[in-house]
Amino acid sequence: MKTVAGWGVFSRRSVIAASVALGLAASMGSGAFAAAKTSVTIGMTIEPIGLDPTIAAPVAIGQVSWQNIFEGLTTVDSAGKVQPQLAESWEISPDGKTYTFKLRKGVTFHNGVAFDSSVAKFTIDRARGADSVNPQKRYFASIETVETPDAATLVLKLKQPAGSLLYWLGWPASVMVEPKSAADNKTTPVGTGPFKFVSWQKGSKVDLAKNADYWNKSVSVKLETAVFRFIADPQAQAAALKAGDVDAFPEFGAPELVSSFEGDTKLTTVIGNTELKVVAGMNNSRKPFDDKKVRQALMMAVDRATVVEGAWSGYGTPIGSHYTPNDRGFKDLTGVYPYDAEKAKALLSEAGYPNGFSFTMKAPQMAYAQRSSQILQAMFAEIGVTMNIETTEFPAKWVSDVLKAGDYDMTIVAHAEPMDIDIYARDPYYFHYKNPAFNEILAKVEATADPAEQDKLYGEAQTILAEDVPALFLFVMPKLGIWDAKLKGLWENEPIPSNVLTEVFWEE
């Protein structure tokens, strides 16, 4: 995380009222400081399609509702660590196949219904059922039975060990939902969180209010109300911030406009990491990308620093594998195949392409994808490779042509799911990458619940991808946060896409 230097905090606001009652002299007046604000307006680029993260994948859903309205058995904190939430503790059997959760007592949903093991069972069965539309349904596939010995005990029996289960249970898609209100959570969400849903003015904003009956008394929730405003245009975002119409844009949409805030002492800019991994995926089943040497040569033709500068105004972290600095067990592998155009040419010649080759990049219309594609096009030309760019509408056309049909040579997209290195083991998946050794390592991750062993294995998995280059690993999109300098408690990094308001407050 980096805070932009030279941007200070504006001075304490104060109001000095002179007494005029009964003709008293002004010198008799008393000072009264304005109370700290208890409301916040958060700006977002994308309006969510709904407010229930258990039935749809877009990250904007969780950015409004996760940890604000909805909570899970576990949660993921700002450092990316798993923490207890509605489950206060758990025990894992020696064989890793039975998880026994002790649930918190005295927790109620916003509609007054008590949270207990029957609710947890309903939520998990709903997520793993045959007709489930849960975006992370595959993560519940290892669960064989859900048992409720008593109201405060939940037992998950697994078909095979799932060492990442506690992490998955902290995701937005795993939040607990109340049975009677679950069907309506898309538009009128009911959770156990520190804020209640008030209203949704489509195309404009979502209003939340503090949950006075919030169960977690160890947390002092300072905000009384919160508003999420949806402003798609970057220029309008900047104007809203400067005018004070929004207090914060935790993910400001235009890096090229960040410099326009210099000198504005009312605002601060905080630059952190997200889980958005920008990668140029290759069809590993199609020539010439089925040849590892070709893929390695293309990686060496890429100057990642130049890509970051041109695609996102220099904001972003270069990566050498499908992993971010937020993630546990992260290894910086950008040095495995660093930029070296001459070595890239030699390796291409060794692979049988001394005169290069031609291919097509299917690039979504988003700015980062278009800019990155143009930079890659110029870099590949330096080693004799011709890349044609075909703009592909995202998400519909990209999903149908690339993700589902696998009809492409190369594409570029920012993968948003946290810790999703397992996509290279999925079969089918659009990379068409197959490496039994990689798959075996990921299987070992799930076979153990030991965090240290998992971190070691994740390091091995990253290294295999860095050496095999099934995709060109480019950079992690930054979390460009711009907000009022007196606003505190917003997450600086984003291990899970979110706008957690629990600890947000205004400095007096």
Image (spheres, rainbow, N blue to C red):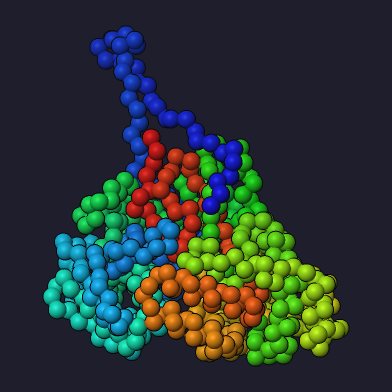
Residue occupying the point 80% across, 71% down: 341
Against 86, is 290 above or below?
A: below
Q: Farthest right residue?
A: 355
- Report how many numbered discs are placed on residues in the image: 0
Please identify the quadrant where the C terminus is shown.
top left
Taking 69 as reference, is 474 left or right? right
Pick whichever, 445 or 364, lies toward us.
Answer: 445
Residue occupying the point 56% across, 39% down: 7
Residue occupying the point 43% across, 43% down: 487
Residue 349 in view in this figure: yes
Pick whichever, 28 or 97, lies toward us.
Answer: 97
Against 35, is 457 above or below?
A: below
Residue 132 in view in this figure: no
Pick whichever, 45 or 497, lies toward us.
Answer: 497
Residue occupying the point 37% across, 53% down: 501
Q: Farthest left residue?
A: 150
Against 343, is 287 above or below?
A: below
Quadrant in the picture for residue 290: bottom right
Against 182, is 29 above or below?
A: above
Quadrant in the picture for residue 98: bottom left
Q: Estimate the x, y position of residue 47 in percent, counting from the top left.
A: 47, 64
Q: Estimate the x, y position of residue 51 in percent, counting from the top left.
A: 37, 67
Taking 419 as reference, is 370 left or right? right
Q: Estimate the x, y position of residue 129 in percent, counting from the top left.
A: 31, 86
Q: Estimate the x, y position of residue 104 in percent, counting from the top left.
A: 20, 64
